[in-house]
Structure formats: structure tokens, C-alpha cells
Amino acid sequence: MAKKPLDKDLRKFTGLSAASADVARQLTYPALALLFLGAVALYAAVVVGDAPMAAYVIVGAFIAGYLALNIGANDVANNVGPAVGSKAITLTAALVIAAVCEAAGAILAGGDVVETISKGIITPPAAMEAADFILLMMAALFAAAVWVNLATVLGAPVSTTHAIVGGVIGSGVAAAGPAVVAWPTMGGIVASWVISPVMGGVVAAALLAAIKWLILFREDRVAAARRWVPALVALMSGVFVLYMGMKGLRQVWSPSPMLMYGAAVVAFFGSWALARPWVARRSIGMENRRKHISKLFVLPLIFAAALLSFAHGANDVANAVGPLAAIVAAAQSGLAAPGDVTLPLWILVIGALGISLGLALFGPRVIRTVGEQITKIDPMRAYCVALSAAMTVLVASALGLPVSSTHIAIGGVFGVGLLREVLTNKGVRRRNGGNPRPPRLDGSMKAALKAQKRENRRLVRRRHIWGIAAAWVVTVPAAAVLSGLMYLGLALVVGQVQGG
């Protein structure tokens, strides 16, 4: 039956309205970001007043705000992407939870000493002037922001820590030569390219394999879930108490190891006692299907995403505003190598608000990449990714291994996807009698081709593996080259202004 003209007109009008709304978002979001950066510059001007080198600090605050926006747009996706991809929470809810927790972590527990950013990566020569050091840090900030911005546009999750490290190295070499770089630090970063994703993937896959063996491969999955889900929730609680003590709250709370481990044990048994009746109530009348069992992991997953976001805000806010703190310290002391470089509250506020706003405006693209485009995620797999992120950081810290939380989370997503792929294809081969090339089924070529297609199907999109890995490897050198060029440009402009 032919479509009525009115139906066609309504469909065209609906499509036009959707396109108009998309264009409006594309114009509105950058405008809001520019408005925020203008407010940051004004805020910095009010705070510094007529202090020495106030203009440098104001420009540095503007660039730091830009980097904070991009960290929120890119880096936070690793904490909430699996939860969104598993449909445990909506994208809007994830943005709200992550934004609040990131800001809280940055402001309440982000007062870290940024020795690594200001002095651990490079050692400024004694003859370097404070103005040159400030230009060096400005170039590093801007280069890291531009690179992370580009990665976000492409939908590639990258390590902002590596971006800022590459930026400091590039501008440091341009300013004073390669001798100023602490090359052992770079060795640890290169090692983390391999260590972080491999450890994250192995731990996440091991957790998923344990869940499959203990619950999903049992005849009565509901009974197995009542027995083991409380224990898994308790494990997550104990791990996150240690994680928050060692990472999330380390700037404001430094408990003894005995106290920290004791708190983890209390959290383990306390959450186990609370989770048992909760799981028992939730499982009443539950069907003996994986989809229904997986729903028991939704609430723990939401808590995990919130805690990871809090810890990320506490730790990674220094990536955005650490160089700004170094700029302020150099401007106040007049030295290229100031003593203690701390993060004042007004600087932390810039980082916290910038990360939260960047996540809200530009984060969905990378969140969808992490949660939906690499492999299919459900709450059970997302729980394994979240728990593996915390466990891997704890193990790596105990062993003294350099790791990146971004790389760990992405490695965990790939790990659960590859395990699922192996088990699924193994099941197809077993059903086909172990023959890698299944014969025709009842003489039907179509059925045989269908069976072979099922056998060889890939549940992890390989193109994302190589694309993300390439972005990781390129991050440090790309940020370094950009930063070196920017430093030379800034030095030339400032020299001409001063000479004129």
C-alpha cells in the first residue's frame, strides 16, 4: 500500500528536527566550553591580582582548563564505559555519577604534591630563567590538551598521564636539550604500554572465568548465585577499601598498612553479611538464565564506577593542573626549579570543574567506544572489568610496576571479550564434533556455511585493538613533538614582544 503524503511529510519533518537538534548541540557544547575557559581566566585574574608574572599565570590557567575539559571527555570513559555498555545505567546517569564523583575526588582528595610533573620528568638547568620554565610548562599543557582533544574526536581512549609526560619532555628538550630528561621515567612509561593492558586483561578474564565456573556452568545457576555472588561482592568491597586507601585517599589519609588491611577485612565480611539476604531476596522467582543472573551485578557495578571515578579525580586532576601549579610556584619564587610544588584549592577547583564539564559535554563518544564498540558487555563482564582495574593497580603498586589506569581498563574490556570469544567458538567446535571445517549438514550447503560462520565469528572487533594500541604508542612522541614546536613558537613570540 502506498504511503500517504501526510506520513511522508511528517517523516521528513521529524528527520529535519533531529538534524537541527544535532547541529544545535555541535554549536552549543563548544560555546559552553569557551564560556568555561573565559570564566577560568577571569577567576585566575581575580585570584592572582597583581602578583609577579600574573599574565603568565592567567594564560596558564586558561590552558589548564582546556586540558581538564579534554581529560573529562576522554579519560573518565574508562570508569563508566563498561557500566553504560552493559545497560546497567543510562548514559545520562553515568555522566551525573562520574561528574559528581570526579569533582569530589579532585577537590576533597586531590591535594597531591606534583613533584613528578614539575621536577621528576625533567631537571631544569640552573641557568634557566623562571619565564622560560613557565613557557615550557605552558607548551606541555597545550600540547597534551590538543592531542587528547584529537583522540577524543577520533573516539580513541588514551592515557592523559602519558600525554602530559610527553608534553613536558618535548618542551624540555626544545628548551634545554635531551640531557634534562629523566630517561628512566620514560622507560617505565614504555613498559606500562605492555604491562598495563596485559595485566588488566588477564585479571578481568580470570574473574569472568571464575564466575562462569562457579555460577554459569552449574545446573542450578540461581542456587550457585546465592552462594557465590555475596562472596564476589565482598571481594569487591575489600579490594576497593584497599584501593581507596592506597590511591583514592592517599593525599588526605595515610593509614598504616595494618590498619588498611584490617579495614579491608572488616569491609569484606561486613559486605558479605549484607549481600547474602539482599541476593536471597533478589533471586526469589528468578529464572535460571544468564541474563537474569547478570542483573545481580548491577548495583555492585554502579558502586564500582562511582569509586573508580572518585579515585580518578583524586589522582589524575594533577595531570590537568599540575603544570599550572608549577607555573604558579615558578612565578612566585622567580626560580625555574621551585622547591615544593603543591596544588592550592583554587587550582584544584579549575581541574575538578573542567573534568566534570568535559565529561558531560564531550564524554559520550569515548564512553560508547569503551562500552559498546569493542565487544558486547553485560553487567557481569562490566563488573569483572571494574574489579580488575582496582586489583591490577594494587598488585602493580605492590610489585613496583608502572601501570596506566586507562590501559588497564581497556585491557580488561578486551580480556573479557576474548575469553568469551574463545569459549563460544570452542563450544561451536565441540557441537560440530571437533571438526574445524564442519561438513554439510544433511547435504545443505547453506547450513554448513552457517555453522562455519558461527565457528569463526569474532566477538572482539580487531580494528579497535590496533587503533587503540597505535594511539597509546603514538601519544608520548606526538605530544612531545607538538610541545617542542609550541615552546619554540611561544619563545619566539615572547622574545619579539620583549624586544619590541
Image (spheres, rainbow, N blue to C red):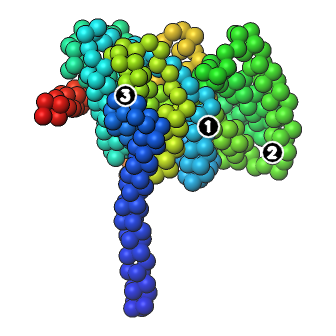
At horizontal 43% and vertical 16% (from top left) the residue drawn is 116
Q: Nearest to the eye among marks 1 and 3: give it.
A: 3
Quadrant assignment, res 18: bottom left
Locate the C terminus and report the quarter of the image it occupies.
Answer: top left
- The residue lying toward the viewer, choosing from 312 and 326, is 326
Q: Secondary structure at mark 3?
A: loop
Disc ID at residue 52: 3
Q: Is residue 437 visible?
A: no
Left or right position of 374 against 305: left
Q: Local crowd at mark 1 within 10 Å, few (<14), some, or many (≥20)?
A: many
Task: Quarter of the image for the N terminus: give it.
Answer: bottom left
Q: CA distance from mark 1 to mark 3?
A: 31 Å
**Mark 1 and mark 2: Cα distance apart in space:** 34 Å
Report x, y in % for residue 158.
Answer: 39, 33
Specify which label sits upstream in the sequence, 1 or 3: 3
- Classify mark 2: helix, strand or loop: loop
Q: Amino acid at mark 3?
A: Pro
Residue position marked by numbered label 2 in the rendering: 283
Tell me if 143 is positioned left or right of 278 in this view: left
Q: Are marks 1 and 3 in contact (CB under 8 Å)?
A: no
Is 10 placed above or below 174 here? Answer: below
Q: Is residue 196 left or right of residue 335?
A: right
Q: Amino acid at mark 1?
A: Ala
Q: What residue would you read off at disc 1?
A: 104
Horizontal and vertical percent position of residue 470: 30, 31
> Of the residues under marks 1 and 2, which one precedes in the sequence?
1
Residue at left 72%, top 28%?
A: 237
384 sits to left or right of 23: right
Decide: marks 1, 2 in contact (CB < 8 A)?
A: no
